[in-house]
Image (cartoon, coloured by chain):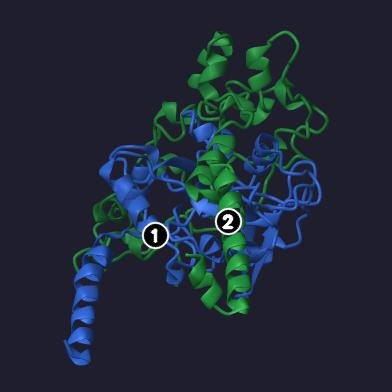
Chain colours: A green, B blue
Amino acid sequence: MLDIFRKLPDAVVRLAVVVILLAATVTFILSSLPPALKRRDLQRAAAVERESAREIKYAGAGTCAECHEMEYTQKKGGYHRNVSCETCHGPAKNHAENPVDFKPPAPRDRQFCPTCHAYNASRPRGFPQINPISHNPLKPCYTCHQPHDPKPPTVPGECQACHGEIERTKAVSPHALLECTTCHVTPEQHKVNPRGVRPTKPATREFCAQCHGTNSTVEGPPKIELATHGEKYLCWQCHYPHMPEVD
Amino acid sequence: MNRRLFLQRIVSLLLTLGLPVGLFTKKPAAAAVKNGKSGAKPFYGMGIDIDKCIGCAKCMEACKAENDVPKEPFFFRTWVERYVIKHDGSVSIQSIGTATNPSSETVVEKDILRSFFVPKLCNQCANPPCVQVCPVGATFQTEDGVVLVDDIRCIGCRYCIQACPYGARYLHPEKQTADKCTFCYHRISKGLLPACVEVCPTQARVFGDVNSVASPLTRLKRMNKIHVLKPYLNTEPKVYYANLDGEVK
């Protein structure tokens, strides 16, 4: 064995010693490292573990109902039924765990409700919005509206309370003197449940022809021959009934 | 055996060994998608209905509170953009402020042709470009389809922040590591909803398993025409938008 080393040139033997030493060092370091430093799957499992263990601050909608039964039953029938308690009261996990020491705030400030309900041109049509400057200035919202079951304090008497834009358009049109109920059959229930119970809309050509057909007895409105005018279309597909064009 | 025969045999041996190995190796992302489809693990996604968003910024506040996102400077894991398209065709996009830092009205209402809010967050892509570029493997996709950042591995090189086509990442000013939306991983792993979905007052955001048969997310996807952001990048985003305007890029 040693004969081989003697036969080899001195430089090669020295190189071999260095290489062996290096290899031994590397193997030692690699074997002594904890597996968490070497294996990616372990690192990722640990990262997922850390991420899952982070502190929860929002308790979730179901938790509040366990104690606050009255507010829960009050809320579930109203317009705010889909609004989570923590949307207004803020994160309340610590309150759920320790109800005495941690009290979530109940926002009573007039600035609070307009976060959602102030008029903004980008908000979807039909979402209830007010102008905070002109809408009962200085009164806190809860004097008229119960936040767990918000309703307008009085049911609207006139259609224009909600449908102001249509009312103003109709007021300057040839249909100004027609009542809304001339064309729309409006159940009383529509005033308290506007989306659930809807008024009817005229669905036939014959409805408009009661005034606008040539055989109509009503004096004044422009007349058309129902059989030849407008082919297959319903009247409103060409004419806007709240502002019919005048020729 | 001459040299030619030897080389031929070596090549045929390599081919016969190599082909089966190549066939049975799965790419990690593809494997994750497949796992989700088999129903073993959920594969999470989010749906956003633009027609329902009222721009109240509750989601932005809840996200900051839940995830300890620094209050200032103004970094967000989720944010809401206000799009205003004017009669002259010009489009202005502004990130809306929160209650503590409100944004002011800058547009005259008569000029507006149409306008709406677009909530944005990490799209939790099924084919995430941020994972590809990370030099230390600190950002990765979990089996349930959430892209996470391992903040012990992250060296704060900002490659992923550059690579994200949706601008969803930022460098956490205290930890000096990349940070982003995790779909509230600590909440969803315990069966809760992400904080932004929890507080959304109009249900503009829905969350769930993209492969489930009946869930709010599946219903949103079934009842609406769905768009994702920048589909041409093939990132396969898992944030699905209903009623998205063509101006949103």
Q: Amino acid at mark 2?
A: Ala
Is residue A28 at least partly visible in the picture?
yes
Dividing the image into 4 quarters, which one contains the N terminus of chain B?
bottom left
Seen from the viewer's position, the closer of residues A243 and B186 is B186
Is residue B184 at least partly visible in the picture?
no
Check if mark 1 and mark 2 are on a common chain: yes
The mark nearer the N terminus, 1 or 2, is 2
Callout 1: SS: loop
How far apart are the alpha carbons under marks 1 and 2? 105 Å
Seen from the viewer's position, the closer of residues A177 and B143 is B143
Vertical arrangement, residue A197 with respect to residue A62, above or below: below
Mark 1 surroundings: few (<14), some (14-19) or many (≥20) residues within 10 A: few
Furthest-right residue in view? A138
* Side (left or right) of A134 relative to B87: right
Q: Tell me where residue A63 sits by quadrant.
A: top right
Residue A70: image location, x then y, percent = 56, 9
The residue that mark 1 highlights is A221
Mark nearer the viewer, 1 or 2? 2
Q: Amino acid at mark 1?
A: Pro
Disc 1 is attached to a residue of which chain?
A
Residue A142: image location, x then y, percent = 71, 22
Furthest-front residue in view? A3
Residue A164: image location, x then y, percent = 58, 46
* Side (left or right) of A22 relative to A195: right
* Side (left or right) of B185 relative to B13: right
Mark 2 surroundings: few (<14), some (14-19) or many (≥20) residues within 10 A: few
Q: Which mark is residue A24?
A: 2
Callout 2: SS: helix
Vertical arrangement, residue B166 with respect to residue A217, above or below: below
Vertical arrangement, residue B13 with respect to residue B50, above or below: below
